Amino acid sequence: MPVAQGPTVSPRSALVVGLSGVIAAALLVGFVWWASQSGEGFTLGDDEFDAGHVSQADSVAENGPVLYQDPETGNRPIWITHTGSEEDEGWVAVEAVVPGSDASCVVNWNRDINRFQNTCDADDTYPIDGAGLATIPVYIDDDRIIVDLQGVRDPN
């Protein structure tokens, strides 16, 4: 019984297809590298982060600030805290990484002392308003807490 034979591929065709794939991959890698180095504001994530409704002010007052892993890259954790007397005022976002340190030294909220505390040096603490930490601009839009992930301010 005869067996059907599939299409044959010439070595030249295989070489052309293979080289085309390698060139396309190299161009893609080159573009991604260039875009990441260009400083033109190229990001893979959103520029803004919706941290929730202003009604969580009571929860923050009772339980302390809320920690978020950076929704832009996942490498920069941020704390959202509330220092205002009204729900729609006094929202602050601070970077959890201790200024001038590598990413291994972060601040955690210590409820016992009502301050942020450096994980690498327990004597190094910061107030709830984030003074001394890098802050990130926050604004309220339709009762939503919006964090501008592109606008980091240096520590006070």
Image (cartoon, grey):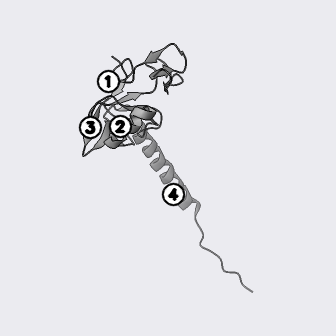
- Viewer-proximal residue, 85 or 123? 85
Task: Determine which quarter of the picture holds residue 58.
Answer: top left
Residue hosting label 2: 57
Determine the CA span between mark 3 and mark 1: 21 Å
Q: Amino acid at mark 3?
A: Asp
Q: Earlier in the sequence, mark 1 or mark 4?
A: 4
Which one is earlier in the sequence, the residue at label 3 or at label 4?
4
Q: Earlier in the sequence, mark 3 or mark 2?
A: 2
138 and 61: which is toward the camera? 61
Q: Amino acid at mark 2?
A: Ala
- Please state the horizontal and vertical placement of residue 69, each as a whole percent of the image: 46, 37
Identify the secondary structure beneath mark 1.
loop
Q: Amino acid at mark 1?
A: Arg
Whether residues under marks 4 and 2 lie with C-beta atoms below 8 angstroms apart, the answer is no
Whether 47 is drawn above or below 94: the answer is: below
- The residue identified by callout 3 is 88
Q: Could you say whether the residue bearing mark 4 is in a helix, strand or loop?
A: helix
Q: Earlier in the sequence, mark 3 or mark 1?
A: 3
Q: Secondary structure at mark 2?
A: helix
Do the numbered discs 1 and 2 sit on residues whose CB atoms are within 8 Å?
A: no
Query: In this figure, which residue is indicated by the disc labeled 1?
Result: 153
Q: Earlier in the sequence, mark 1 or mark 2?
A: 2
Q: Which mark is residue 17?
A: 4
Dot 4 surroundings within 10 Å: few (below 14), some, or many (20 or more)?
Answer: few
Q: Which type of secondary structure does the marked residue at label 3 adopt? A: loop
Q: Nearer the viewer, mark 4 or mark 2?
A: 2
How many numbered marks are there?
4
Which badge, 4 or 2, comes first in the chain's sequence? 4
Question: Which image quadrant for residue 61?
Answer: top left
- Residue 108 in percent (x, y) is at 50, 26
